Image (cartoon, grey):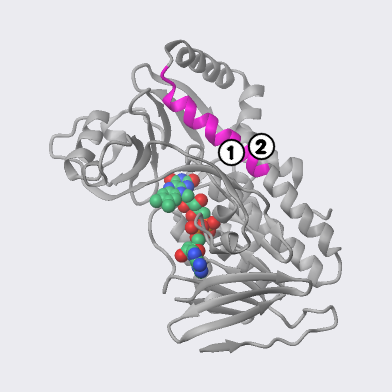
Amino acid sequence: MWHVWLMTAGPNGHSGQPVIVAGAGPVGMVAAAWLVGAGIPVVLVEAEPVPKTDWRASTFHAATLELLERLDITDAMREEGLAVPVYHFRDRRAGLIAEFDFTLLADETRYPYRLQLNQQHLVRMLYERLSQQDGVRLMFGAQVVDVSTDATGATAVVRTADGTHSLRGSHLIGADGAASTVRQALDIGFDGYTYPERFLIASTTLDLREQVPGLAYVNYVADPIQWLFILRTQESWRAVWPVPAEQSPTEATSEATLQAQFQALAPYEPGYPIVDSQLYNVHQRVASTFRRGNVMLVGDAAHINSPIGGVGLNSGIHDAVDVARRIVRIRAGDGDPEAELDTFAEIRRRVAVEYVQADTQRNTERLKEADEARRKATHEQMRAIAADPDRARDYMRRVSLLESVRRFGVGLPP
Ligand SMILES: Cc1cc2nc3c(=O)[nH]c(=O)nc-3n(C[C@H](O)[C@H](O)[C@H](O)COP(=O)(O)OP(=O)(O)OC[C@H]3O[C@@H](n4cnc5c(N)ncnc54)[C@H](O)[C@@H]3O)c2cc1C
């Protein structure tokens, strides 16, 4: 059965039409909340029946927390999250190499730290808010199966339990994740590569600081074979490590393997209480364009990367705010639509390539460097950066995405 929801056009051609947001992950939720807050009607279409609660990204950087202030949500995130000003670059054999301190940025941001908070909490907070707001239609259990764009707007074909529907909007924001249907429907390439090793994320409720004295709340631990990324959230300690291509998922996620990994970090005779584990493929890929007509790609639909550095979700949120600000201006008749949307596509793709991809690739290579001379050179480089306040400050500005935001802005007029 097909239903067509007709929307009446207002004086600027689309003031009665909603913006369609495909995907209610953290990036789609931010886009929806921003637009609704600006008085623009939104239809948020999500394939799952309820917001996802699986553990994924858990880091919010300074630049993102500043942007989210406008949604009046940063304080709630800080209340639930863990502010971590210091992180370590370590080597499994050589121990602590360098300590980096975000408080060096205290004179340029109100958030001189990483906020550790599992992404599903942001999704929950925004979902609760949107559920109570006028001007937004939440369609959960509704899968976008096709998308098209034309001179006056965009159309999504959506499949729900009671049939297939056609939705019409002034714009459509594709926030439907790495396997984006929106991206595929518009035949937009997603070139890049997949790491041969998969990444395993495992969480334990045991306090790792008691097992490894001096451990920071965020640690990058280099090793040619078994590098580690260890961080703390309010719920647990989480470790990420590589799983070789030849190891089966069953073996990689078995209790014995998970225990062996934690025991290698620090022996604990009773056994680590492990509360969660996930094995996943990691890619470095960027969409060939972030815009086709009135459809824009944001977040993982537009770019995916290694989690080492915790910038993928952050830059996805910046995409969402950037495009939302432009749509607000276009809908108010204040911006040239073509120039606004082209600027979104150009700048956000540039940030994805020049910052997010470049930094996460380098971070990941640094952790797994096998050449002894290069490994030692990396140690020296990290020590030298940490020891020089000016270099350390530049480094922290870059890793916290403040540099890219100060350079390009987020959603500035063309
Ligand atoms: C297992 C795993 C672990 C991760 N761990 C980390 C980490 O430790 N650190 C890190 O920085 N990043 C991590 N990431 C990446 C991080 O989770 C993403 O960058 C982030 O979720 C991107 O948000 P998003 O809203 O763009 O996409 P998503 O969170 O993927 O949300 C997309 C939403 O769209 C919905 N959807 C998909 N297709 C359709 C459709 N056709 N119609 C309607 N809805 C649809 C999905 O159900 C989903 O709710 C991890 C990812 C995975 C998969």
Residue 29 lies left or right of residue 340; in this view the side is left
Residue picked out by circle 1: 357
Contact (CB < 8 A) between labels 2 and 1? Answer: yes
Please state the extent of the stretch shown in magenta in the rendering.
351-370
Residue 134 lies left or right of residue 336; in this view the side is left
**Residue 236 image point, x, y percent:** 33, 47
Local SS, label 1: helix
* Residue positioned 60% across, 51% down in the render: 189
* Residue positioned 57% across, 57% down in the render: 74
Residue picked out by circle 2: 354
**Residue 23 image point, x, y percent:** 53, 66
Cβ of mark 1 under 8 A from ligand 1: no
Q: Quadrant of residue 13?
A: bottom right
Per the picture, the main secondary structure of the magenta-coloured stretch is helix
> Amino acid under label 2?
Glu
> Amino acid under label 1?
Gln
Q: Between 48 and 59, which is closer to the camera in this rendering?
A: 48
Task: In the rendered view, tell whether residue 368 sits above or below residue 242.
Answer: above
Judge whether residue 368 is colored magenta: yes
